[in-house]
Amino acid sequence: MSQSTIPTSDSSQTAPQPRRIHHTKMPTLAFELSEEVDRYVAGQIATLIREKKGAGQNAVLGLATGSTPIGVYRELIRLHEEEGLDFTNVLTFNLDEYWPMEPDSIHSYNRFMWENLFHHINIPKENVHIPDGTVPLAKVEAWCDDYERKIQEAGGLDIQLLGIGRTGHIGFNEPGSSRNSTTRLVALDPKTRKDAAGEFYGEENVPMQAVTMGVNTIMNARQIIMLALGEHKSKITRIAVEDEVTDQVPSTFLQKHPNSMFVIDSAAASQLTAVRIPWMAGLVEWTPLLVKKAVIWLSQRVKKPLLKLEEADFMENHLINLLRACNKSCEEIVHEVFLDMQSGICNKPGGDKPITAICFSPHPDDDVISMGGTLITLADQGHDMHIAYMTSGNIAVFDEDASRHTKFVNQFLELFKLDSGETAQLYKKLMSDLEEKIAGEPDSPEIQSIKGLIRKTEAAAGAIQAGVPESKLHFLDMPFYQTGDVKKNPIGEADVEIVANLLRELKPDQIYVAGDLSDPHGTHRVCAQAIIKALDVVKAEGIETEVWLYRGAWEEYEPHEIERAVPLSPAVVHRKRTAIFAHESQKDQALFPGSDAREFWVRAEDRTTSTARVYDELGLPEFYALEGFVQYRGQL
Ligand code: F6R
């Protein structure tokens, strides 16, 4: 990264040090991990609260909701509980609330704030201000004016905390919001509603409108801290800090604020020029990985295979420093990169002798979607291949599918005269649970079980297609996932112990882990953390294993990151597709498709064939498809 270390305001010895990213239009501080972002930002807020207290004044905070600031709130709670941080002199104003919205709804930002922060600290109730989603339409304007007045009466916002939406929104100021806008009722952008669809169990349940502070309200804060965590925020982060100011991306307005900063983790920083192509943004420290990245970039930029690159290509494309720093000829550098990539191509991922391997699949379809070809290869080559499904994935099943399966079982029982008063009663309850379910609310425990069972049977069908028998499937049902809600708990000891027990039982030579470590709140990352903790536990008992990371359904590793590329023949790709098709509840239309409208099997095939194309264009052998892996070496 092209950056320098800057001091933090937190004096504690263990305070994480941010790195200042250059080539941006507003101060941008990056930390390796999202937890470090949380600690740094909570530290800034705590410093303000203490300073204000010392001066006998109130600290006025503008607060955000969403997945991003949760870690900051957890850290503030910790500071309160363990270090006595006092909130009695704190006044808060939240950015926004859906409209209409009852404050006790599970979707309400009011409820969110109390559950994630206010209930756990000693802030006086009357100091909390949150936009009201129950104000009737005719009174909304007056209510918003009053909100603005209250902020001014409090002396204005000392710090405004912000997340950033995929549209570049701040608060709910969507594209087109005026620089001068104040608190008001707004319509939500379709992209924002899509992003919220998961939490609301369907886009149709997401409100169309919200009450939000305006851009001007936010810009009037004395300090603004904008946060972005995770790879899914990397594109909009780059636009916000590198592109021109425009009302089409309201977060760009912050470039004009005299005291704003963007605090991000390394995943969100990944698309910034100074991180993605640092040689274009100034001097760099050339590590072997960066050399590989630059050479691949050059080859793609000048559209020449690696071994046809010449010194002139380096000189004409800002890479003269690379040649100088490496003190090697262009040919030597290029050859090393070529050989490195070539040696990663691996037809026998399990090696020559039979091994025991486990594929850890966060949800019941990640195994076949993300590494189905490698699963098939390992099973076909006679290895003892196991799959561990870490969660039931029950929240991603449509009600119609639960209803169809329930009807099937009922009619099956009737057909074979196995029905009884008890089964009839259960059937009635299940059908009424489904019919009377309030849109956007979680399912009854019984319906959750049925949905989990649907995914379990699909997982088994998919695994069989991939050559892994049912006897080698392990359904871990990790407790962190079992909230019945889209929001999950952090991992606990019980989660780690479940994984550790499987490692103790099978003593695998190799394991495969979904390495979506950049998504700070997603299930994949939590699952990876549990595995990594469990590996530490069993290592102390003498159990060690080779760990390979694969990417989830959303993205592939970049070519320079791939350390092992497993070639897939057309026949293997076809079997992989059949295995993915077994996940019927996720087929045609998935409940949580993310921002990509393509079906999972299409994404999987596009991704593996395009990796093969990249290798081909770099002058490596031409394959039909490739699955990429990165070796885990003790560092996330
Ligand atoms: C929330 C808010 C929004 C979010 C943004 C990012 O109060 O105003 O602007 O900050 O949508 O949401 P997450 O953090 O969930 O990605």
Image (spheres, helix red, strand yellow):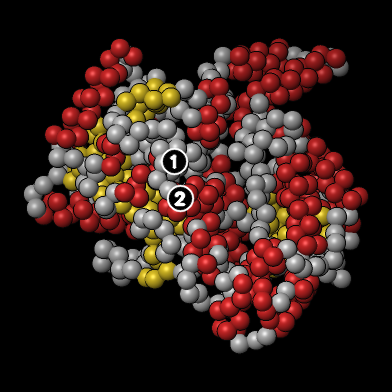
Against 554, residue 308 (above or below) is: below
Q: Which residue is mark 2?
A: 243
The percent position of residue 54, horizontal first and vertical second, equals 11, 54
Q: Which circle's residue, 1 or 2, is located before the other in the chain?
A: 2
Three-letter amino acid code at disc 2? Answer: Asp
State the quadrant of the C terminus. bottom right
Pointers 1 and 2 in contact (C-beta within 8 Å) = yes
Residue at the spot x=79%, y=52% of the render? Answer: 609
**Does 9 sit left or right of 350 as displayed?**
left
Against 546, residue 358 (above or below) is: above
**CA distance for labels 1 and 2:** 9 Å
Residue 185 showing in the rendered view = yes
Q: Which residue is mark 1?
A: 249
Considering depth in this image, is 471 or 532 the residue closer to the camera?
Answer: 532
Q: Secondary structure at mark 2?
A: loop
Q: Is disc 1 surrounded by few (<14), some (14 to 19) or many (20+) residues within 10 Å?
A: many
The percent position of residue 554, horizontal first and vertical second, equals 65, 47
